[in-house]
Amino acid sequence: MGHAKELSGPDLAAGVELDQLAEHTPLLGHARGEAVMLVRRGSTVHAVGATCTHYSGPLAEGLVVGETVRCPWHHACFDLRTGEALGSALEPIPCYEVVRRGTRVAVGGKRAHTPAPPPQSPANVVIVGAGAAGAAAAEKLRRLGYSGEITLVTHELPGPVDRPNLSKDFLAGAAPMEWVTLRDDAFYQGMKIELVRDEAVELDTQGKSVTLRGGRKLAYGKLLLAPGSEPSRLPIAPRKQRRASGCRAASPGTASSARNSARRPRAPIVHGSSIRSTARARSFAAYRCGARSLALRSMAQSSRARRTFQRSAKCCMPEPGLAVGGTERARGSRASPRSTPRPS
């Protein structure tokens, strides 16, 4: 999902003086054609990859906390000792040997990390839901050394996807499909994870089994439920629901439909004041290329929230063709269909 970046900083394979390393402050450099950073903690020096595996963020600009480093972009967290991903990212970062030569330290070869199998493991694991949480859990089990059967159940096509991208670059027409799909079938086959495209409809906790809509029954030793959630819908007539799309954008297909609707003569309207709503509005504006103005309205419950929304909309969405509409306090817990602004 990222792009190759030019290497910068010293050649760490040749080494640097130890006194060049400030405590808890990454030193960005490169070794054998790859971006690497050194992090000093007391007498210990760690050498790890300097590029976040989530969206290629600059880890050297991140925050070092204890034995971890956090990416400044989306707060992905990595263990400086092993390179393991501890949050947000799926892939670990490379971890390197540190070679001492007198007062100099240099980056050696990459370390191989083979975890020992857990001392107590269930016979098999079933994970219901293949969003970011479910997909990450399945991979993490393998990375921790679990060798039993893993079944990942999802009823959304094509399978695990990078959902935030569906309302950002993909919606704007700037991201290819390979940026959206987290993993393909070949990856799961290599990891020996069974990906089942069906819907779980019944759970038997006494018999420890999950029944799928297609009739298959999955027995489990341990079960992880990660089904996600559904977006709140506007209280509009059912016949008009087909013209409304939730910001969750459950699949590339629904995201593509929403994107195509932005090319229609009437400008789309985005309701909501969340980060996801403003991101979708920005993507719509970029995709429309200023063909018509885009109406955006906040249904914030407080004047403070409305002011925050207006500031973020004006700062984060400067593209031509985007008009930020007035805000309106929602009455009760549901928005009135009549509060919808008409596009100019």
Image (spheres, grey):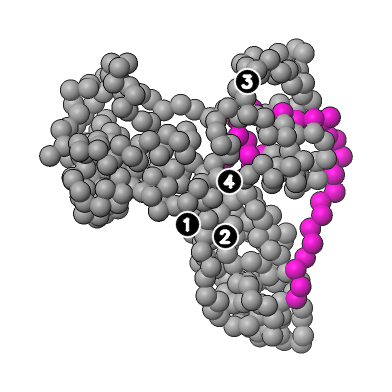
- Marks 2/1 in contact by CB < 8 Å: the verdict is yes
Q: Which residues are magenta?
A: 108-137
Residue hosting label 3:
200
CA–CA distance in space, label 3 to label 1: 35 Å
Amino acid type indicated by mark 3: Ala
x, y percent for residue 290: 21, 51
Q: Which mark is residue 182?
A: 4
The residue under label 2 is: 52
Mark positioned earlier in the residue sequence (3 or 1): 1
Under mark 4, the amino acid is: Leu
Q: Nearer the viewer, mark 3 or mark 2?
A: 3
Residue 12 x %, y % = 66, 80
Q: List x then y, in percent, for residue 69.
A: 59, 60
Q: Secondary structure at mark 4?
A: loop
Camera-near label (1 vs 4) is 4
- The dot on residue 73 is 1
Badge 3 vs badge 2, beta-carbon distance below 8 Å: no
Q: Is residue 24 visible?
A: no
Q: Earlier in the sequence, mark 2 or mark 4?
A: 2
Q: Secondary structure at mark 3?
A: strand
